[in-house]
Amino acid sequence: MMYGYEWDTTTWLTYTISILPIILIGLTVTLKAAAAGFAIALVLGLVFALLRRSRVKVISWTTAFVVEFLRDTPLLVQLFFLYYVLPNFGIVLPAFLTGALALGLQYAAYTSEVYRGGIEAVGRGQWEAATALNLTRMQTYRDVIIPQAIPRIVPAMGNYLVAMIKETPVLSVITVLEMMGLANMIGERTFEYLVPLTLVGLIFLLLTLICSAGLHRLQKALPKAGIPLR
Amino acid sequence: MDWSAYLPMILQGAGVTMTITLASIVIGAVLAFFFGILRVEGGPVLSTIALCYTEVFRGTSLLVQLFWFYYALPLVGLSFEPITTGILVLAAHAGGYGAEIVRGALSSVSTQQLEAARALNFNRFQTLFRISLPQAIVEMMPAFGNLAIETLKLSSLVSLISIADLTFTAQSIRNLTLDSASIYSVTLLCYFAMSLVLMVAIRIIEHVVRRGDVFPRSAHS
């Protein structure tokens, strides 16, 4: 029994139906973790991308190194690092937040590259026009560059969101009870892993197919010229 | 913390990680070409099978796949050593993504090239191996490079099915010493170093492929 739901292992069908509510509770945790991680990645990635373009060499090089380091080391080890080392510095976060932070940090490294590509794809003429209009660097980014970069950025961001959803099961190792962690626990108690793990796999497959289809539609609906920020 | 005792353990773990990664990349590349070519050239039935393969291994999470093959397969009577399971699942995962890269690159070969091959009376195999692939493989290299790094990173997940790779070793040393900060820092640096080595290796392979030594130009002579 888990979350008040009793399982019934007589046949695979009754087993599936009886554990479905438990797995769906896990699904909400999975989606929440991905949403929180993605929010962190979107904000932090933009910060990385802008720092990377800084004219001060020390800042841009340090950022480049941090991004490269985050990109080239495994999420699992980063997760352990945050989970076990942050408390040494007096920062004690709940497992869920640690997990979201780890996801966010790793994907911020990816999204910063997407922002960079999107920003660099905006033509030089736009920068020159902004200079001619006497806009500050801040205004140029906010009113000219980023609005035009958004349509180029969104599809790649969507792909990373899908990728992130598929990486959330890693959070189960730091006791976040998302879908796969629950499936594993059910397996441990019933000695029957096949049904819960297959169910979780199928739900992931369904999720990614739905997300990809939604992304495809979004991509078509986006105005090519750009989206004003205000 | 006394590193002299733990350094050999870490190096051994790193060796296991490297072995698993390289084996997965090689098997994954074979799977990628096999299913990628099937997607493009396979006809309705075979290309649907290849599509199912890529969608299943790309669409379900790697950790779910690992546990599925680790816990669930023995229940239906198929049981492998953990390390075999780890390598096969990582390879199948990389192969799923790789097949999409191969498919994308093959379909980006210009139709004029294919028409020219047809005009010269090349059959399908000749067109594929002498015209399409030599051009497509150059396009694939950067994406394959990223996939290789991705595979190295994802290989850390095999520690969760009790394979003594670098991450697993780090965990056991942490449990002995409780010095999380140093051991995880060293582990992260190890992975970073391995990524850099892998990147250099990929650059070299990319260079060789660009020179065209992979497909000798016997057709011209």
Image: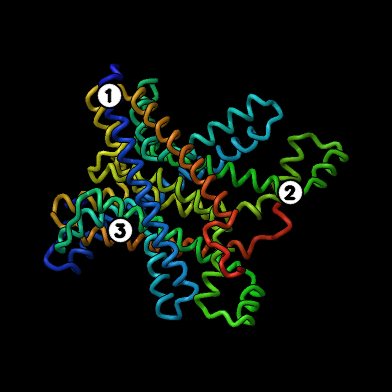
Which quadrant of the view contains residue B119?
A: bottom right
Could you tell me which chain the residue with mark 1 belongs to?
B
**Pointers 2 and 3 in contact (C-beta within 8 Å):** no
Q: Which residue lies at the image location 17% right of the left edge and 57% below the top edge?
A: B79
Q: Residues within 10 Å of mark 1 (few under 14, many from 20)?
A: some
State the residue in front, B156 or A5.
B156
- Under mark 1, the amino acid is Tyr
Q: Which residue lies at the image location 38% right of the left edge and 47% below the top edge?
A: B22
Q: Relative to B87, does residue A109 appear above or below in the rendering?
A: above
**Residue beneath label 2, please?**
A122
Percent x, y of residue B153: 40, 43
Q: Residue furthest left?
A: A10
**Residue beneath label 1, please?**
B6
* Viewer-side label of 2, 3: 2
* Viewer-side label of 1, 2: 1
Q: In terms of secondary structure, where does tag 3 sit? A: helix
